[in-house]
Image (cartoon, grey):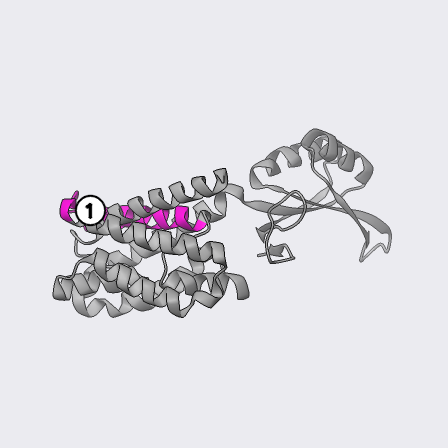
Amino acid sequence: MRNTVRDCLFILLGALIYSIGVNYFTIPNRLSEGGIIGLTVIAHYLFDWSPGIVNFALNTTLVLVGIKFLEKRAIIYTFLSIAASSVFLYITEETGRRLTDDSLLAAIFAGLLVGGGLGLIFRSGGTSGGTTILARIANRYLGWSMGKGILVIDLIVVTGSVFVIGLGKTMYTLIAVYLGAKAIDFLCEGLEEKVAVLIISNKPESVLKVITQEMSRGITVLEGRGGYSGQGKEVLYVVMNKQEVARMKHLISELDEHAYVTVHHVQEVVGKGYKASNTKFAKSV
């Protein structure tokens, strides 16, 4: 129950931040967005339709169409995020005003706020509906990050907006969309970014002991063989937070300055001691 309340609060906060980005930076500076919100903004420019109402109608329709791709919990959170973002869009539509005349600054802050808001929603298990459902499908079946999936879909929508807002504003919009995708990835993955480390040392037992004791990390010992020498070697494999890598390299260098260490970025880690998921593999990128 505590986690559910926390998730709902983050979804509401994310929806508010998202709406401020749209109504205080995107629309007043006649920029656009990607995905469904991009279509909503264009409809506002062309027909003066309320972004909140159009956002609710389009996103709800797409969620009902793609509901089979979401789990029950995600469905509930998604409808909450759609309702919250639509209400906040409607409320801030009346209070929204241009905070800067600089299109570049507007694009930067629009991207950070819209992306940051969506990142909080995604991190809590929801979506904003619309194209984010397609991004979740790409994340599950293609291994794409949420930011990458949304970026590809958004670029398609943004390209079409050039006929409404012009080439110059569209170019600024691309900056906002790119920054938004990066903000989403940071909030969804960057705060818990993991790396996989392979260590080949002439003192494997000493390295294993110091990492286990000093860093409290479990290590898998793999049997390897030198390609040139043909000699058997023990290869150490460990997954840790990215922030711990510097300390690990320092500990290893004190024991074996000639140790060979490779660090690989890991997209997802599933298993005991990490998070649960339907995926059963740690995917390196």
Query: What residue do we see at 53% from left, 43% from top?
Result: 192
Characterize the local packing of mark 1: few (<14), some (14-19) or many (20 or more) Cα atoms within 10 angstroms: some
Position of residue 54 in the picture relative to residue 271 (left or right): left
Residue identified by numbered label 1: 92
Helix, strand or loop status at disc 1: helix
User: In this picture, which residue range is highlighted in magenta?
Assistant: 94-122
Judge whether residue 116 is colored magenta: yes
Query: What residue do we see at 65% from left, 35% from top?
Result: 248
The x, y position of residue 244, in whole percent, is 60, 36
Query: What residue do we see at 17% from left, 61% from top?
Result: 44
Judge whether residue 26 is colored magenta: no
Q: Is residue 142 in sight in this rendering?
A: no
Q: Foreground residue, 72 or 99?
A: 72
Q: Is residue 99 above or below residue 149?
A: above
Q: Is residue 46 above or below residue 31?
A: below
Position of residue 279 in the picture relative to residue 253 (left or right): left
The x, y position of residue 64, in whole percent, is 38, 67
Q: Quadrant of the C terminus?
A: bottom right
Amino acid at circle 1: Thr
Quarter of the view holding residue 229: bottom right
